Amino acid sequence: MMTDRYAPETYNEFHPYSKSKEHTISERGHTVSAFNGRVRVTVVGVVSAGLVGACLLATRVVSAAGQADQKQVKNSYMPVVDTENFATIHDRMAAAKAGVMKRQMDLLDERYDLSDRPAKNVVMDRTKPVQEGVRVTLPPGVTWNELASDSAEQIREKGTFPKGFLPLPHANHPEGGMVFPNFEIQELLKQESRDLTRFDLDFDIPERFLAEFPPAIYLTTRPDLGDVSKGQLVTIANYYEMFSGILNPKQIEGLRLLLTPFPQQQFNQTTDRRSEKASRGVACLDCHANGGTNGAFHLVGDIRPQEFRHRIETPALRGVNIQRLFGSQRALKTVEDFTEFEQRAAYFDGDPVIATKKGVNVLERGSQVHFMAEFQELLDFPPAPKLGWDGKLDPTKATPAELHGQEVFFGKGQCATCHSVPYYTDNTMHDLHAERFYKQQMVNGMMMAHDGPIKTFPLRGIKDTPPYLHDGRLLTLDDTVEYFNLVLGTKLTDQEKKDLVAFLRVL
Ligand code: HEC
Ligand code: HEC
């Protein structure tokens, strides 16, 4: 359904910041959020069911304070002035949490098969099984091969594009912000007594579809050591003992800064925070756990309005040394730039005004940014014992299925056009134009719109870092094969798809 961006089902009902307790669509005086839940505009007018969209467009608009009438204004900024105390905000949002999470979990249940189906004998870093099978749900009465025989236009018109292939909304898209998985929260509580729980939201994707926790750490400088994490989560509490004698002093200092919490939009000391207690903030490696990923997500800072912003799932920092573009779409050119700009504005939804209020941390380029980048550049991809120096399979070690999968990858599947050897990235961006297959529409406060150009993520070590794509919309490698088969129109057979998955698992 196409909906107006102020339609109540997307912005009122589930917007916990809204002051309105009543959510019936025939009510007088809707409260809607204009941006990120922090601008409140009261829409006055009699709105009857069925005519909501049209009526909302035609209603008079009065500012929240009930001052002079004014036209609704487009806005890129967040309000800086506090208008409510913490307890009021907290209680309203905490009360709405169950409804917000139910809406999101219903969406996941509709889109995916979330059951526990571990692949036999395929694990991530150490022991966590890789989940197998296509998990995106097909529309009723269609098979994957039938779907792939339709053109993009036919799929769009029939509405048969699988919903799990659409952009994935944030757990509460109108609100947004950083969300951490429970295992990370628990470990930080234990080691640092720092609490990354949000009172308004929980993590949504089941943990079986996330990377093994804590991830392994491989250093480009010391491949002889193997996994240097020894199964521990590196934090400010233990990093020194773990790394003194392995890293140089510059790198140790860089690691310390990557583990030091700094204020951020949801975790800070202001009344407009989302943690129970005033918070010291978040650290880089709270998301890039052990330089890998724990699946933490938020909304990208560089798109407006809110419903067009992408959910972004934390990429592993493994292999940033060989990459030349950073951010799925931001295209920053160096790890140094990414490191410096992340805490200045990306931590605050790309809004330097609110950053100043909440406590921006400006890093010094020569002695801080540089050291932090230097540590990140040491993070290696995991070992791939079946690959040779050219990044391709060693035929003496690979199975026939893997070798066939490689043939499909470099041939009929066309994967290597963008994922080129030896790291399986071309270090550029591509626009897959997946929006050819569906109509632009609002889902849970997010516009199912074009993704635009996205960076070609490297595929080395890919089995270790589910879920997939910039927003984590695909839960398994099998899903990525169906996705690209449809989007690229390669018409792979069942056997070709199966063997392609086998190949992806050994990269
Ligand atoms: C809330 C979790 C979170 C925190 C905290 C965080 N990041 Fe990230 N990081 C991400 C996400 C998500 C992306 C993808 C960004 C995008 O797609 O635009 C990313 C991307 C990156 C990239 C580019 C990786 C790539 O493959 O393109 C680098 C480098 C990086 N982060 C470093 C840092 C540093 C340094 C810090 C601390 C200053 C930090 N991150 C804090 C989640 C986080
Ligand atoms: C036109 C270039 C292009 C081709 C061809 C292509 N890919 Fe990709 N691939 C991308 C881009 C761009 C992304 C990131 C998309 C996103 O995040 O929305 C990506 C992402 C992926 C991911 C997820 C990476 C991650 O870290 O989440 C996998 C797995 C993948 N591709 C596998 C394949 C396979 C298998 C094929 C062949 C069947 C293929 N790709 C063909 C460009 C391409």
Image (cartoon, rainbow, N blue to C red):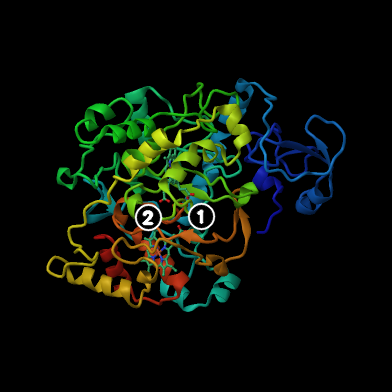
Q: Which mark is residue 357?
A: none
Q: Which mark is residue 323?
A: 2
In the image: residue 303, left or right of residue 406 = right
Circle 2 or circle 1, nearest the eye: 2
The answer to whether any part of residue 401 appears in the image is: yes
- The residue furthest right is 68
Q: Amino acid at mark 1?
A: Gln
In the image: residue 84, left or right of residue 416 = right
In the image: residue 188, left or right of residue 223 = right
Q: Is mark 2 within 8 Å of ligand 1?
A: yes
Query: Quick one: label 1, few (<14), some, or many (20+) residues within 10 Å?
Result: some
Number of marks present in the image shown: 2
The answer to whether any part of residue 143 appears in the image is: no
Element at label 2: loop
**Picture quadrant of residue 1:** bottom right
Provide the residue designation for mark 1. Answer: 329
In which quadrant is the C terminus drawn? Answer: bottom left
